[in-house]
Amino acid sequence: MWSDNESEVDLLGFDHLVSVITSIIRNESLLPATIGVYGDWGSGKSSLLKRTEAVLETDEDVLVLSFNGWLFEGYEDAKTALMGTILDEIASKRTLVPAAKHLIVKLLKRINVMEVLTRTGKMGLKATLAYAVGGLPALSLSGASDIATLTSELGDKVKEVKLEDAELDKFIKEDASQNLRRGIREFRKDFEKLLKETKLKTLVVIIDDLDRCMPDTIIETLEAIKLFLFVPHTAFILGADERLVKYAVRRRFPELPGERAEVGRDYLEKLVQFAVRVPSLGRSELETYINLLFFAKTTSPTSDAFKKAQEYITSSSAGSFLDVRFNYGIAKSILNDEIPPELAEDLNIAQRIAPVLAVGLNGNPRQCKRFLNTLMMRLEMAKAKKVEMKQRVLAKLMLLEYFKPEFFKRLAELQAAQQGQPKELAIAEQNNAPKNSTNTTTSNGQTGDDKDETETSDKSKIASKGKATSDDIKKSSSAKPNPSPLSSEASTSSISTWLSDSWFTDWLKSNPLLADEDLSPYFFFSRDILQGSLGGALQRMTPQAQEMLKELFQESEAARNIALKKAKEMSPGDASAVFQAISERVREEEDLGDEKSALNRLNDLVAARPELFSQFIALLNGITDSILPITICLKIVNLAKENGEINSSLELLTKWSTSATSSQLKAAATNAIKRLKDL
């Protein structure tokens, strides 16, 4: 498995982005500068910043300070917290001359005054000024204490500087009476002097995960940089999702005229001079990334073989940028034709799943890594249970789990009722599989025949030592997930309605075919998903998907309509995760006819994302007739009209038209069938 944290090893091919960032910083004519490293959650921003930090630290005249945005989240005033932390870091990492020590203490005094006045600001400006001019007996003591604490943390570097309460009182009184512009100007002047006294060529401050902070923290951090710290020989690098920073700006300045989206854009453009955007990985790039992940697992990122792989990728010609730049053939060459069977199988898997993950997960490296980690964890759990599972079979089923969760759940019910080998799946494969589908040759020169896999058995059987475990698995995987709202017909219903979904038919055709496989162990190790998938859905939802889920349940219809417009721009993986989360709410609700019900919200989402319609039909197929509102029939007609999915809709409505538990649904379905046939 692989760590989900940032990495100094470049697996994403981001050296060109590191180069452009460092070139800006090393060009003195461009400083001071603020560089925004923008990208979606999980796109690789943190790894890019880590690589940039490692490159910059090779220059002795450059001081690099790296902070996580969350570091300032707990402070009442994030602005002063950031400024104080930067001064603290400078003092601890540089040898200070007496003049520099004095400047640090002077700047710390100003920061403490700002912090104290910020706290008292809630009393109103007049009260604050009166409090300051009146001598500040209590405030003075607090300020002196804060500065004394900070001074002690600096150790021997500032021991020579004495702190006097009278001096602090004088400083506070003078500072409080100064014009705000003058106060900012004086701070910047002293901060600039400090950098000169420390003999620094450049101070680089990297702030990552800014987009995970509360809106006020984001704005205060940006203000601290622009107002107080933006002086010659400084560079600030901000890692964030640009959309979330803009959202914070709109929250802070809602009263500004014009379109709110423009406020966020204009604000950022004034604060950030250079924008470096981390792109999503394309199909070939993602396959290269997955191949490198597997190669690093087998050979170690510090090995000579892995370094050769990186050198090969770096030295690839410009014409190969859109090609897979590391694969089976290249790995075989680097390892002198002695490629381990496990690695060969891993690279074969990568070639098959990369195209789907690239589109479904929008080329997101973190989501991809989490998919692979889940796959590896399940294989490890099976190994501990002495159960054999084919990696390629598991990977194929997991693709269905991630991108078509309703189909995955229905397949779980079918295999549970038929001892792991559902006849419906076999029929669907037989009708849709291309000729010679079990013996295809990959671009790596490998065979796609299941017989050529590293597994010794041609079926997913239980190891002889684990027969007792096999019985447990069969028993456990036969238990239906969430049985209360699902009808008993769900476990025996046909999956023919799924065949109208092009994604599903492509999935059926892909190797390996599953008709002859015992699927029960695979679903046994997916019980966490099957027995309550809301947690699983939330775990793999990006911040944007989680925000979308929240917005779809807002009270305001106008707000929901805005959210639905944004839903059209979601990646397929995010759309599937949101669908899955809402589906779980549908299963748990008692009144599906309520206007605020999750069923209505799911209907809205499907209208915005037509590719989810077949999953919607699959979900409705498994819900007991008696709890369905009659309005669902007309909704199905409207969706079918928009999507052109007439046959699957007719099949569902026909089932409802014979309902023995709801006469109202029966009548509504009969009328809906007439409407559909008239289309």
Image (tube, rainbow, N blue to C red):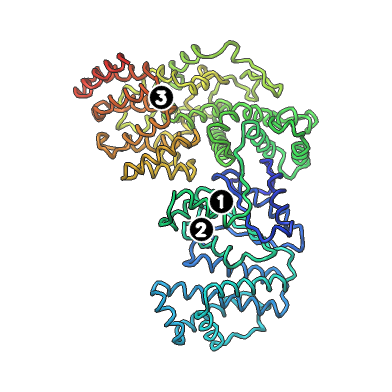
Amino acid at the residue labelled 2: Ile
Residue 414 image position (x, y, % from top left): 41, 22
Q: For numbered disc 3, what is the local secondary structure?
A: helix
**Neighbour class for label 2 at 10 Å: few (<14), some, many (≥20)?**
many
Residue 623 picture quarter: top left
Q: Which residue is under mark 3?
A: 614
Q: How many marks?
A: 3
The answer to the question of whether label 3 and label 1 lie on touching residues, with beta carbons closer than 8 A, is: no
Closer to the camera in the image, 388 or 126? 126
Q: Are marks 2 and 1 in contact (CB under 8 Å)?
A: yes
Q: Which residue occupies 67% across, 21% down?
A: 442
- Residue beneath disc 2: 218
Residue for point 64% across, 32% down: 287
Is residue 103 visible in the rendered structure shown here?
yes
Q: Which mark is residue 300?
A: none
Residue 107 vertical placement versus 669 (above, below) = below
State the quadrant of the N terminus.
Answer: top right
* Mark 1 crowdedness (10 Å alpha carbons): few <14, some 14-19, many ≥20: many
List the residue tagged with mark 1: 240
Secondary structure, mark 1, is: strand
- Looking at the rendered structure, the kind of residue marked 3 is Ser
469 with respect to 639 (left or right): right
The residues bearing labels 2 and 1 have C-alpha atoms spaced at a distance of: 10 Å
Foreground label between 3 and 1: 1
